[in-house]
Image (cartoon, grey):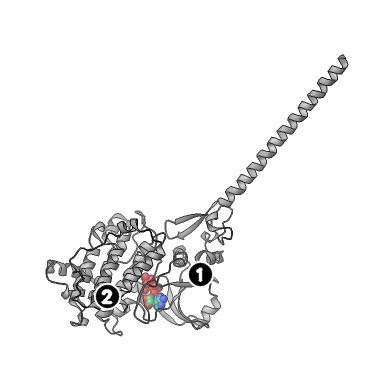
Amino acid sequence: MKEESVGLIIGVSIGVVIGLVLAIFAFFCHRYHRKRSQIGNSSSRRAATIPIRTNGADSCTILSDSTLGPESPIKSDRHGMPFWLDGFKKSSSMIPASGLPEYAYKDLQKATHNFTTVIGEGAFGPVYKAQMSTGETVAVKVLATNSKQGEKEFNTEVMLLGRLHHRNLVNLVGYCAEKGKHMLVYVYMSNGSLASHLYSDVNEALSWDLRVPIALDVARGLEYLHNGAVPPVIHRDIKSSNILLDQSMRARVADFGLSREEMVDKHAAIRGTFGYLDPEYISSGTFTKKSDVYSFGVLLFEIIAGRNPQQGLMEYVELAAMNTEGKVGWEEIVDSRLQGNFDVKELNEMAALAYKCINRAPSKRPSMRDIVQVLTRILKSRNHGSHHKNSLSATDEVFIDTDQLENKISVTDHRREESLDSVAEVYEV
Ligand SMILES: Nc1ncnc2c1ncn2[C@@H]1O[C@H](COP(=O)(O)OP(=O)(O)OP(=O)(O)O)[C@@H](O)[C@H]1O
């Protein structure tokens, strides 16, 4: 009996020990599997960082892989960084990211007759006209230097323009990053830059009738950048040589090498073009949408006067503004080549708008949306005759509070662009 109970106790003890071992094993197995599945989930949700602009202080949009979808072409390296941040070694990754096709070096070489068809030269490098074998004509900008800054601007253009589409922007149609060369391929603008029409002795003086629609085209391009693009874009270098004209003399905004989102960059060197720079930006180092508005105001005066802002245009404007004392008009600043061939009312309205844009206080400057509305109205009354009942005078403060409107009507960027377009279409009869 004694022996039997000892055996029973030993048996129970062994059973308990085995049970405990099994329980501990099962517990660790469970924990291990849970951890594995957590790792799996978190890596599939890990944020992919998509550089929107890599010029200067990088500004990024964070999208999760799940947002991108399982078939997302955007690949991250083991640190979760996109490949194309690493220079251009893996530039083909930019194709799906930018949505732009990559052109073959040899095709561009052939289309430009071995890079002999130069049509311009900018800070970025030479620009060539290229006749592709498909029949399309394009403009090819070749990055002249291998500097880091140049590469950054190349990256900026590809990433930025690849996602921006508007008929008043010079759309990027592709790029080439081959054989150590970096090239940007654009829609060809057969009438060259606005500057070449304002200042060239070869081209005839631009008629007044064309100047107002050109101003509206530029305003619409900028309005899209400020309010249609997600995230918004500030151009930072609005000037007449960055406005290009197509065969019907419709204008598009070009050159996004300096573009970036709104930012404070007190320590960075002032960038942009002398004569067009917002004084507030110079003193504070803060570049905002209103700094683009200032440059646009200078451009409007340049269009009116046919004078270069780098050669004292604004002093001339300030003198005229003092003389007018709000009563007379701006006739004295009009391009002398127009010799009376301009509409005085339109001129006064456009100059009054330009003067608002160059107000020293950014908060007193109109937004690009306001500007589009005013210029649209000017052209609308041109088409309807100057005695149109509902037309508004230049002195009326009619800037619509579109922010308030926006709160009421939630529209997608696309629809918003379309609705603005339909307002602006009015003059295109
Ligand atoms: N898409 C295009 N179609 C036709 N001509 C173009 C095109 N892009 C540029 N050009 C021509 O090449 C010139 C140089 O252009 P680019 O944008 O490189 O420099 P920029 O704007 O004149 O000067 P910067 O680089 O200093 O701003 C333009 O003035 C224009 O005459």
Left-right relation of 202 to 79: left
Where does residue 397 sit, x and y in percent of width and height?
20, 63
| Residue 5: quarter of image | top right
Q: Which mark is residue 281?
A: none
**Residue 32 at x, y = what percent?**
67, 41
Q: Amino acid at mark 1?
A: Leu
- Residue 98 at what x, y percent from top left? 50, 66
Q: Looking at the picture, which amino acid does disc 2 mark? A: Val
Tags 1 and 2 in contact by the CB under 8 Å rule? Answer: no
Say which quadrant the C terminus sits in.
bottom left
Q: Is residue 392 above or below residue 198?
A: above
Asked whether 145 or 240 is in front, the reply is: 240
Foreground residue, 355 or 63?
63
Q: Where is ligand 1, by quadrant?
A: bottom left
- Mark 2, residue position: 212
Q: Outermost residue toward the top?
A: 2
Out of 272 and 169, give the one closest to the viewer: 169
Q: Residue at x 23, y 75 (%)?
A: 381
Left or right: where 175 falls relative to 373: right
The residue shown at (27%, 77%) is: 211
Q: Secondary structure at mark 1?
A: loop
Location of mark 1 (residue): 100
Q: Residues within 10 Å of mark 1 (few under 14, many from 20)?
A: some
Note whether 390 is above or below 74 in the view shown.
below
Q: Is residue 300 visible?
A: yes
The local crowd at label 2, few if under 14, some if 14 to 19, many if 20 or more residues have their Cα within 10 Å, is: many
* 171 relative to 389 in the view: left or right: right
Quick check: is the Cβ at mark 1 less than 8 Å away from ligand 1? no
Quarter placement of the N terminus: top right
Q: Earlier in the sequence, mark 1 or mark 2?
A: 1
